[in-house]
Amino acid sequence: MSGDVSQIIHGQATVPQVIELIPTVWPSADEPTQLAIVKSLQSVSGLGTATTTLGLQTDPTAAYSFLSVVERLVDNLAAIPITTAAERREFDKLVWRGKVVSVVNEVCVKYSLTTSVSFANLISQLGQLQSGEDYVASVLSSDSSSLFKWGLTTTKNWQVLVSAYGRLNNVTKTRFTQSIIRYMSGSINEATASAWASILASFSPTVDVATTKLIVDVGATLPWSSARYLCAITTPFINSGLLGNLMALWSPHEFVASQRVHTCLLVYLAYNTSKEEVVQLMHSPEFVEGVSSHLSSLTPSVKQLAISLANKLSDITGVNRIFEVEGDPDIDALEPLTIDKLTIDEALVAINTTDNKVVKTSTGQTVATTTPVSGLTLSHKATTTARPRFIKDLVDYLTVDSQKKDAYEMVRTALEIGPTLIRQKPKTEVAFYAHTLFKDVVGLGNQFNDDDVVQWRLQMLIAILVKCPETVPLVVKLLAQGDYSLSQRMQMLTACSMACRELRGLDDPATTKAFTPKEFPSERLPAHIDALYQQKALADVQQQVMGHRSQQARDDVTDSALSGAGKVVRVSKRLEHQRQLQNQPKNSFSQVSNRQFFFPLSALWHAVDGRVDLGDYSAIFIGHYVTTLALVLACGFPSNDYTEATKEWFGVANDLAAQKVTDAPVVEAVATGVMVVVDSQDAEILVSLIGPELASVSQWLMSVFEGIIDERVRSVVAGALMALNEINTQFERSLANQLNGFY
């Protein structure tokens, strides 16, 4: 044994001899002996044999010994001599195509070991190797992210990659370009756009059609500001001859986010193309077909993209715009970007010097943290955000890039100031941005995890609808076509009912406090979620109408007990309630309430034949929809079209009765609507107008009454049945009086 070790120390042992001695010698060997073992294996064949043997070990101790040897070998790749083409290919396969890393990882998982072997560590030695650029193609396939992270650290490293790019074949060059586009998408913004443009210019990539498709796909996942810069800095490397090809690929069947980035790419490519070529494009079949297909889409945002592209190309060529209407605001705002030319040293400094992040403190204040690459210091600088003064400011604040240092404070300020600002501004200014603002608010996520974002978002929607009731058709379109969640759809409906009540002049606490927690039956969402959707207005209407019904029952008993008395000792609550109806706020809105709010919403219900498919949550949404119709209907009394609206609402209720729905949210909604209608409409008109519907709804409510377990819902249904029974009784008496000739 000592003789074999002596041979190793003096460099006389062969690779097989060293491999055979490692399990017994390595664990107890001193540092000089271990160095001698590693040195004797510093060859392509030695590394390959050690790696293969490591993968064959069944003993944990022996596996650990071989793992230590392999780690020492790959920590100094420059010491491995490579003299022939065969050795270069074998070295490439072992190190850069992943054999060493895969074997090491497999052994570490098998025996619960840790290791320093990784592609990142291997790539860090790429610049130390002779002809290291020869291995770049292999590294691209193995770990392109680590490759560019290393390459963009110093100018020397980047020159290795630039030199390697010149030796690649066309297919690998395309893969190189696509990989760096993916890599830079994670950090491209206003501060780094010029730096990334200079990096791309240093090796002048050729962007083909496949790469433009990648740009569109990557850009669709980024904030709009980042996607815009990505398109701007890559279009100079797209051959202008591809403009027609990209136009042909512009399809309305893509995701809207992808279509917006694709449109942005076309606009910036047109900026980099001669006017003659753009004019030729606008007369091409691809352009006509693309614009026509987008205009035929049922999605408004897709139509806007077609309008914006056509108008932008018209502006570039200096001809009159094709369309006189506004298109997509993001595309309309595109202008040629001025990008500074930087040296590679300056570009690398701009990319690597700082990492700007947004941190929200416990008080909700935004703090910009600047972390140098060394990570030794951390400076905090609190930021302040100006209050928005115009509606356009609200749009800008709500759509701010989340990576911006004061993004949280801007969004928060817009939500808190928005409801007041919208009500203060002239209607013309609000109407100009109403559709854009409404969609931005509906789609606003709670990315900073604030507890009250839902309430503030609702208040913004209410304010928009109060200022511009003409926005209701947009709400209907979003409900029918938009890709929104259950909570977003229910919030849009709630905003409609709350705005309608405010316009009617009703003093509703729900306008300032979005939702009130409610007890919930087992058929509903969990309490903490269900509480968000039980608006105060519904509770107020139920309490008002049911209170009248309960008091009326007590009045009937009291009236019978006092019959025959010689004087009036009390005033019936029935007369007081009728007086309350007459004393409702008097304004002209009731005359247009149904036309602006009720009929658009009821038309959507009939357009889909009352079919709502939201899985387990369908009943919740249907109940909320019917409740919204009832609340809006209550705001339309008195009006010339109230009778027609009443007929429409009972048509919806009759559809649900015919389906024999038993879900508590739907039953409660219909019962509430019944009481609203009966309390405001003459009974004889109701019977003559919708007699069969009244009978059908009454029979359905009676059939489901016994199966309701929630006491609150039972009381609402009982009130509705009492109201319907009173109509039947009152109508029978009226018929008898007519037959007996009393009037």
Image (tube, grey):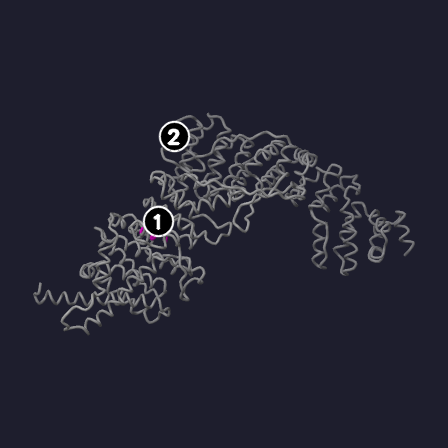
Q: Circles 1 and 2: CB distance less than 8 Å?
A: no
Q: Earlier in the sequence, mark 1 or mark 2?
A: 2
Q: In the image, what residue type sits under mark 2?
A: Arg
| Residue span colored magenta | 494-500
Mark carried by residue 476: 1
Q: What residue appears at the point 49 percent right and 52 percent down from the top-left corner?
A: 450
- Nearest the viewer among 199 and 286 is 199
Identify the residue under disc 2: 321
User: Is residue 498 part of the magenta span, yes or no?
Assistant: yes
Residue 171 picture location, percent across and down? 61, 38
- Mark 1 secondary-structure assignment: helix
Task: Report whether 478 appears left or right of 55.
Answer: left
Residue 226 picture location, percent across and down? 53, 39
The image quadrant where one finds the N terminus is bottom right
The image quadrant where one finds the C terminus is bottom left
- Mark 2 secondary-structure assignment: loop
Local crowd size for mark 2, using a 10 Å CA cut-off: few (<14), some (14–19), many (≥20): some
